[in-house]
Image (tube, rainbow, N blue to C red):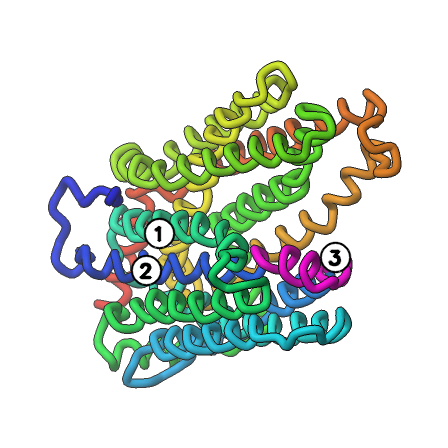
Amino acid sequence: MISPPQPATPITSDEAVSRTKKFAYGGGGFADVFIKQIINSIANPVFQIALGVSPTLIGIAIGVVRLWDGFADLVVGKVSDRSESRFGRRRFYIAVGTVWAAAAFVALTWFPQDAGATYYFWHFFAWSLVFFTGYTIYSVPFAAIGYEMTSNYNERTRIFAYSSFFGGIASLAVSWAFAFTQLPVFGGTLMGTRALGIACALVILATGILPCLFLRERGTAEEQRQRARETKPLSWAEARSAFKLKPYRIVLALVFLMLLSAWMVQGLGLYLNVYFVYPGDMAQAAVIQGWAMTGQQITTILGVPVISWFATRFGKRRTLQACLGCMLIGSISKLYTFHPDRPYLEIVTMALLGPGTTAVFMLCQSFLADICDLDELENGQRREGFLGAVYLWATKLAISAGFISTGLVLTATGFDRDLGMNQPPATILGIRLLFALVPAVAVTIAIFLVARLKLEKDDVAAIQRALAARKSAA
């Protein structure tokens, strides 16, 4: 199995993270990605195509649920920061969220036969709301415990490399969820979806519980309780104090921008394949789309150890800029590769996007661990839960905004569904330009933002020395 590299230089015992703990956090990363993606993978194929629920209603349900999920993150983050128990501040919530999400997914997939589209919509909406509440209870403390596993600058990158690696595997697994429901052994979508519910619940339980079993927060139980007592309640003043941290604002802006631009044009690739690359040939369009997305997922997974190696030797900022440069080339290349004369070059384009996507989310998580130290120095609190929750909220807001704007972008090109394969050349050109240039512009801005992110290894070491001096004086 490919795994992120271990440190080439010695790490002091209080900073080292064992391979077992890294694998445990990686297992939690698998559960994190699996939980948040699994409903999207079956929403339209099962509830819209098989059960007849309106796609508009499905979209509204997902949008409302994820909006609730985002705001619940802030509450759960602050609650876990202020929790005192013999299990620490995080592990109890990780365990509860794992069981909650697993049970809710079983309930979501066990719907009655021939109940009607209206019933199926409300069933999907209600249990999705319950499911994502469980996900919030799991995901925010899970992210927070990762930020506080070590104070070592490079070890933090390696920890999130494991999480990203196994998260990529989870994405591949989720992409086969609907195919699983169609296996002949189940005799139909109803029983196939029920079987999927049980199988996914077992996967969630087996991987989501690993951080709870194998990970601990740094420090003694009394030190953990002291951190909880020093954390202030949720308020606007608390939020403002976090946003005063320039590196934090940059990381949030970077992730929001990348997700918004990606989701804004994500669906345009399929339209190009159907209406331009393979006009009217849905089967061929689906095949090339599948191979292109598989290529991106493969480079996403294989890029993890490479990115981790470069980040620990040349710095997170340089590595992130290099990966964004690769993504910029891939984005611009869409103008050439998405073409009837050379359709399989799409795979190369999408493969170029994988490392950039991996680097953004893996290294931004590592930067967040460093920002938690800066936050403690500037504001006197260890509030990994809250800072991580705002980060998650920003990602969900970006995805929601991008998802909503996709239709507006397509409409702006003049696309008319009634024209079928007879779309005007100007419409096809508009789709090609937006598909390539929107993410290209976003990546260019992202490279500029990363250049302003002054949080290198020496900067973090200075922050930690100042914290140690303050604690010694106290």
Residue 470: x, y in percent?
Answer: 28, 65
Numbered tag placed on residue 27 in the rendering: 2
The residue lying at 58 percent from left, 21 percent from top is 343
Residue sitting at the far bottom: 85
- Which residue is labeled 3 in the image? 55
- Residues at badges 1 and 2 in contact (C-beta under 8 Å)? yes
Task: Label 3: state its secondary structure.
Answer: helix
Query: How many other residues sit within 10 Å of disc 2, few (<14), some (14-19) or many (≥20)?
Result: many
Q: Is residue 320 above or below residue 18?
A: above
Amino acid type of disc 3? Pro
Q: Is residue 298 left or right of residue 419?
A: left
Q: Main secondary structure of the magenta part?
A: helix
Within the magenta stretch, is there residue 43? Answer: yes
Q: Is residue 298 above or below residue 176?
A: above
Residue 189: x, y in percent?
Answer: 59, 63
- Which residue is labeled 1 in the image? 166
- Find the distance from the CA under tag 2 to the CA under tag 3: 33 Å
Part of the protein shown in magenta:
40-59
Residue 238 visible within the image:
no
The residue lying at 86 percent from left, 36 percent from top is 416
**Circle nearer the N terminus (3, 1):** 3
Within the magenta stretch, is there residue 446? Answer: no
Task: Label 2: state its secondary structure.
Answer: helix
